[in-house]
Image (cartoon, rainbow, N blue to C red):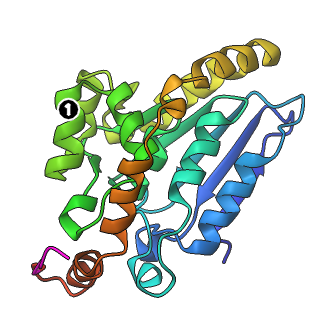
Amino acid sequence: MEEIKVETTDDGAIRTITINRPDKRNALSRAMFEELQQLFEVEPPPTERLTLLRSEGNVFCSGIDLNERLVHGAPPLAEVCEVIHDYPLPVVARVQGDAIAGGAFLALFCDFVVAAKPARVWVSLVQIGLAPPWILTRRLTQLATPALARELVLLGDPLTAEYLAEAHVIVSAVEPDELDGEVDRIVGRLAQNAPLSLRAVKATLAAQPYQELPHDEVEAMIVRARDSEDGREGVKARLERRMPVYAGR
């Protein structure tokens, strides 16, 4: 079974990337991260107008496969989110269900997030002894108000897509049976626009100063949390469905 599927419309205007691991709640393995990174690092053909990122099943993406993380360490989540953010053409995320941890960032780094109202965005890393990479948290502070960004990453509790749409963090939240129609509306409208104009506007929007801020000390703190005993304990506790016991080291 292909865990990442890629399809293109006959006219080449719309590329669709599908995360296809519904039996694992679309958790991303290291190989899947690497494939996604490669897909967004390629130069799009002249006919392309946009990419649609979607998934199979009831969960959009539950983030990093925790079993793999215990063995192989942190996968390139920040790198994948950055190449999505920097992709030369618009990227639309279709979020039919929960977007958790890395899956939340995957969606929020897209240019448009269209979600079903009950879907939840859940940046739960702090609850398992981890911290999001610098660039991902900084992106949240641009997408949301400082108070909402803190609610997402410091509490680590889920927020509904409807709530985030009302806060203008995502573009749209609709009833589940209206999701595909709303996605088609936005995708269709983007596909009508001139590709060179889309590229110019996307490049302007992607040129954000937060990438230039010095943050070596903060990055070191994130790495310490990621590689700590507490980080491993948090991941193990989540896999074992128990409360973690943190030691502060």
Instruction: Tally the marks.
Output: 1
Image quadrant in which the C terminus is located: bottom left
Name the one closer to the observer, 92 or 63. 63
For residue 239, side relative to residue 76 (left or right): left
Q: In this view, does 186 lie above or below 126?
A: above
* Mark 1 burial class by Cα count in 10 Å: few <14, some 14-19, many 20+: some
Percent x, y for residue 143?
A: 37, 27
Name the one closer to the observer, 206 or 27. 206
Image: magenta residue range: 245-249
Percent x, y for residue 60?
A: 42, 55
Q: Look at 34% across and 41% down and name the residue there.
A: 176
Q: What residue type is labelled 1?
A: Leu
For residue 228, side relative to residue 75 (left or right): left
Q: Is residue 248 above or below residue 197?
A: below
Q: Look at 65% across and 21% down and name the residue there.
A: 202
Q: Look at 53% across and 68% down and name the residue there.
A: 75
Q: Name the residue under label 1.
A: 148
Name the one closer to the observer, 197 or 138. 138
Q: Is residue 22 above or below residue 11?
A: below
Q: Quadrant of residue 239?
A: bottom left
Q: Look at 48% across and 49% down and name the residue there.
A: 106
User: Is residue 246 inside the magenta stretch?
Assistant: yes
One can see residue 173 in this view: yes
Image quadrant in which the N terminus is located: bottom right
| Magenta stretch, overall SS | loop
One can see residue 59 in this view: no
Q: Quadrant of residue 169?
A: top left
For residue 36, side relative to residue 61 (left or right): right
User: Is residue 215 inside the magenta stretch?
Assistant: no
Percent x, y for residue 7?
A: 75, 51
Percent x, y for residue 80?
A: 59, 52
